[in-house]
Amino acid sequence: MNRKRYLFFDIDGTLITGGYDKSCVPDSARLAIEKLKAAGHFLAIATGRGQAMAVDLMHDLGFENMVSDGGYGITIDDRLLGITPLPKDKIITLVRECQERGFPWGLQVDNSDTRLVPDTRFDGYTHDFYLKNRIVPGLDPENYAEIYKMYVACPYPEEHTLTSLLALPWCRFHKEYFFVEPADKAFGIRKILDHFHASYEDAIVFGDALNDLSMFTEDGWIRVAMGNAAEEVKKKADYVTTSVDRDGIYNACIALGLFEK
């Protein structure tokens, strides 16, 4: 067969056309996945989502490998090998600043679909449906060994006034709140490649959003941007395909000769 490649796909805006609804996966993307597997390539998802929040979609798409949690979670052969937590001391500092400023906040302290909050204010401000909220009166980050994500509710651009946020990775997907989470998918990709003693030159990454930029700053592998990608991502890409809803994954695979055995 041709050279074996290690392919890593972002989810939202790359494999699916929008939101968290897995029914938005284009038929052409599913067909591409089948043909890539038949050609003998290694396939993995590379997502900012928590592992617990992405594993069902991983199975639905026929994947067994995943870089999750913004690059800090590694799943190989359908087994979670581990998730690197955020620096606890820096999260504690941010929590204290949010408390002083009166910003509602929450923590994710395990690999689950549940966010811990100290009261009802976060839900009242955001009405967020992505995670379940569990109220823990007197919630204190000091009481948890590991913290994987933090969520802060405040209007844009108030996050830029939080000085302790400068020491942490974060991103905003919603107008009501922002995520404090890893943003280094390349870190997880390298860990998987190292696990298999694979050359970085054999990797191909697919992405569209600003939280995919870490994958596009690595010069050792091929970088494919979707047609709907942010301009910053396209500028770093080796190849720009069509948009996710115009057979972008399938067309890129044809252009790169990945279906050939």
Image (cartoon, rainbow, N blue to C red):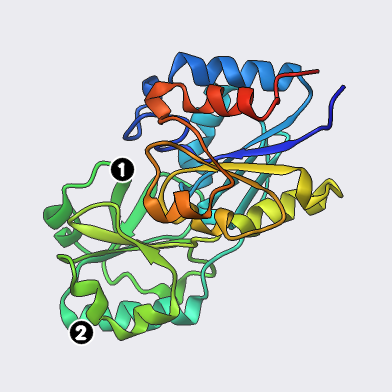
**Secondary element type, mark 2:** helix
CA–CA distance in space, label 1 to label 2: 26 Å
- Whole-percent x and y of residue 100? 20, 84
User: Dot 2, how many residues are within 10 Å of its Cα: few (below 14), some (14-19), or many (20+)?
Assistant: few
Quarter of the image for the N terminus: give it: top right
- Whole-percent x and y of residue 233? 46, 52
Task: Read off the residue under disc 1.
Answer: 130
Image quadrant in which you'd find residue 216: bottom right
Which of 127 and 33 lies nearest the eye of the viewer? 33
User: Which callout, 1 or 2, points at the residue further toward the start of the chain?
Assistant: 2
Residue drawn where x is 49% and y is 57% of the image: 213
Residue drawn where x is 20% and y is 67% of the image: 104
Q: Which mark is residue 100?
A: 2
- Whole-percent x and y of residue 38? 74, 16
Task: Name the side, left or right, on which 213 lies relative to 78.
Answer: left
Task: Name the side, left or right, on which 23 lies relative to 51.
Answer: left
Above or below — where is 196 with respect to 151? above
For the question of whether residue 126 can be seen, the reply is yes
Residue drawn where x is 15% and y is 76% of the image: 102
Task: Name the side, left or right, on which 233 lies relative to 74.
Answer: left
Image quadrant in which you'd find residue 245: top left
**Secondary element type, mark 1:** loop
For the question of whether residue 83 can be seen, the reply is no
Tell me the kind of residue under disc 1. Answer: Tyr
Image quadrant in which you'd find residue 24: top left
Looking at this rendering, what residue extends furthest in the left direction? 124
Above or below — where is 12 with respect to 23? below
Residue drawn where x is 29% and y is 61% of the image: 178
Above or below — where is 136 with respect to 221? below
Quarter of the image for the C terminus: give it: top right
